[in-house]
Image (cartoon, rainbow, N blue to C red):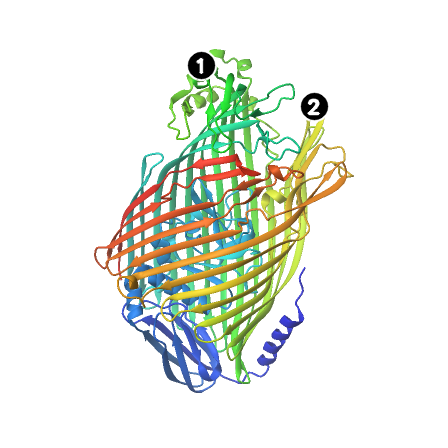
Amino acid sequence: MKKPTKLSMLTLSLIAAGMTNVAVAAGKFEGNIRDINSQQPLAGAIVSIKELNQTQTAGRDGRFFFNGLKAGTYTVTITYLGAAPQTKTIQVKDNRTTSLNIKLTSGEIERIQVIGQSGSLSKSLNRQRSADNLLSVISSDVLGNFPDSNVSEALQRVPGISIERDQGEGRFVRVRGLAPDFNSVSMNGTRLPAPEDDRRAVALDVIPSDLVQSVEVSKTVTPDMDADALGGAVEVKSLSAFDRDGRFYNVSTEASYNQLRDKASPKIAFSFSDVINDKFGFAIAASWYKRKFGSDNVETGGKWDFPEDTGYDNAVLEEIEARSYDITRERLGIGANFDYRPNDNNDLYLRTLYSQFDDVESRYGSEVSWEVGDDEEGLPLGQRHEAEVKRSLKSRTEEQNITSYALGGKSRLTKWTIDYQVAYSEASAAKPRHIDGADFEADIDNMGYSETKISRLIGPAAYYDTGEYELKEIEVADSKTTDEMTSAKLNFSRSFELGSNSGGIKFGFKTSSRDKTNREDIWKFEDLDESGINEDALNMSKFADESINYRLGQFGPRINAAPVWDLVNKLNPDDFKDEVESVINDFDIKEKINAGYLMGHMDFDQLRLLAGVRYESMDRYSTGVEFKEDETYSSSSFNKDEDHWLPALHAKYNINDSTIVRAAWTNTITRPTFDQIAPGYFVEDDDGDIKAEFGNPNLESLESVNFDLSIEHYFDGIGLLSAGFFYKDIENFIYQTDLAGQKGRFEKFDEAVTFANGVDAEIKGLELVYVQEFNFLPEPFSDMILNTNVTYTDSEATIDWFDDGERMERVIPLPSQSDLTANFSLGYENAYTSVWLSAAYKSEYLQEVSDFEDARYDLYEDSHLQWDFVAKAHVTEQVTVYFKAINITDEPFYSYTGSRRFNNQYEAYGRTFQLGVQMVSF
């Protein structure tokens, strides 16, 4: 538990002292900053009052507010990257509001509004420059200018961000090399729940980019933000009618083509917003995308055996599987947002989101296992031997839904500003009754494999003959996970003066609750010949379909799901239900979190200090099922409570109007994932070997002390050169361990796998960013734009386990942490066309520790470099035709066991091409 330091408390004391010396001042100054040509709001513009050393930042609607000003004459300066600064003189009177509507103009601004990416960079850089914390921003224009179909893929363009992919599509986001569960995701100020049963992380592919106005990634958090953001906090902001001036619409239609599966897919998206009488605004957006694609895969699952003391020489393979996937993913996103501004002092809003993600997947597998010799070892490369072959089908539909409602507002009183929100969100993931595995087995002689990396199975004609295989088991499953979150928060803020300096204070409260449940039923239809099924009816030839077009070699026929269901429906499911597996993964986890904070800032000429402290208390109650050694099971329950004091100190120093130095000391946490704290407990006795697997509801949250130091230089036009160093000292690092042999309950166990809090871990890194519009060069080079960033990261953590009662340990890098991530985008834009070539790279990283004692069995995901291309033609001011090429080098997914020579998984997706038309009003 962190406690406030003397430095942060001193800063807060200065702020509090300033509050006692505030002169009575009731004047107000407010205004709106817009582009003179398009009348669009210029979010992120900085408004400064020279005499008071006070600054405010224009919001997303271009508005700014100064409250509690003394009567007098003031000099106001407005700056915005890409526009010439303006200076105005205003007169403030007591108990009066002074209004100033500002129109910024320059050749650069006019260009910004006509051409997408320049405007996108300008909006993002202005918001980043004006922030008190370290922030990266992607505007809606960026989301549309790259071939990124969802928020996750768009975020891979941000410095220090990489993504986890599933079937080639971006899903989860990593911040600074930290796994997705270390980062928080919010939308419109409210946290989003996670549909998956095991994670806290939200898969951002369920949010179509068409519904989004901007995405912000906070790499340093302030006390008014949720603390469980050890890596960073992702804030998604949806559309608002006041983001535009008057009526606005955006309609697009698109067709995409997946080369691997030779499938075409449609997409339609639209958004519409309008403002009525300058008081009521509504924005509606919808996106529908039905994508048909697939992948071809070969994987060993790490089933290599490396003899002792020989390194990787003389390796033998125990198991290998070829897989082919046919996938249809349908995404539907709808957002309806309403704003009401009854007067200049009050704003009310309602934000809604409905996201539906249906994933229909058929997986065809061919698994080969060897047991060679008396020791039943694996097969060396270059040899052939009899093997057990299992051809399988997995056919399921997963339905994920996220619904979110946020009702809130902001009221500006004479001196204080109050903002408030109540929110409800629900996520669910259902896999209705589906085939979780239909297995046909045969013993086939003379089986082998071609190589150790991208292995191809080698077999005789019998291997492809469906008549050789017999149905051994059909597993049917039905599961559903729900995650409900409710929250309410209230914040108070105001500005003040302390001598010749100015400052502000803010405090607030938040309460939230979460209820995560998981239910699963399993049926195992096996020994079917004993259930009256004719042996001939179990032959695979009765279930076979056409041969699979498999790019990694010959595969053979696929299994048809229809006759499998016909067989299952003839049987009584009650006779085949697995009572243990149907309850062992069921759980109900309830969390209640209460938080409060106090923070403030002081401005000393060019220096701003922001200090504060946040307090969070958490109570968790979890219930599950315990399956004991005597093969009985019963319910179990656990209580866990924590509290955290989390101080923070931020410093922002403006060397000049173009160069900023930032420093931050923050404290954050990450709560354990749901699979880590799941209360289920399973023990089995396998011929005298006692093995257990269970979660640990008593895990402590990870705590991190974070240090950040950066320098940013903004060019006169549109551009940025920055460098930033970060360091995180993490306590209570969570890892998987084996407690077998430890004195006590598990002393006689052969395996007792669970999760534990370890000793400290640390991560440090360097972020470099270079963004440049080359408008200072002669034509045609003046139309070029470069956006690139590189992040270097290093980490280490210690894991331990027990071997014959003796504690052992070794040092590993943090899982999911790449040493190097990089993004590169080079574009050419003018009034008629836009062309962009982009690349996203991440180096290899540790996926999983498979054997505590032997690092040769650690699983790594290999480096990944993906190139994308976008070309647009602006037919008119409103109509654009575009072409996008995704993964143009056909980059596969590859993970390995210890050394790149030894396959864990290889998966190919092919290229995807998109052609579309967009119509936008201005």
Q: Let me know if residue 567 appears in the view.
A: yes
Quarter of the figure with the C terminus: bottom left
In this view, the residue farthest toward the bottom is 72
Task: Please provide percent x and percent y for residue 819.
Answer: 53, 51
Residue 39 visible in this rendered orientation of the protein: no
Nearer-the-camera pick, 630 or 705: 705
Kind of residue at badge 2: Asp
- In whole angstroms, how far apart are the C-alphas of marks 1 and 2? 34 Å
Reading the image, the residue beneath label 2 is 687
Looking at the picture, tell me which residue is in the foreground, 425 or 919.
Answer: 919
Give 577 or 103, whichever is nearer the viewer: 103
Q: Count neighbours of disc 1 (C-alpha within 10 A) and say few if under 14, some if 14 to 19, many if 20 or more.
A: some
Q: Position of residue 333 (x, y in %)?
A: 38, 48
Residue 245: image location, x then y, percent = 31, 66
Q: Tell me if mark 2 has few (under 14), some (14-19) or many (20+) residues whose alpha carbon lies within 10 angstroms of its own.
A: few
Farthest-out residue, left: 876
Q: Is 7 left or right of 893, judged from the image as shown?
A: right
Q: Is residue 649 above or below residue 846?
A: below
Label of residue 467 in the image: 1
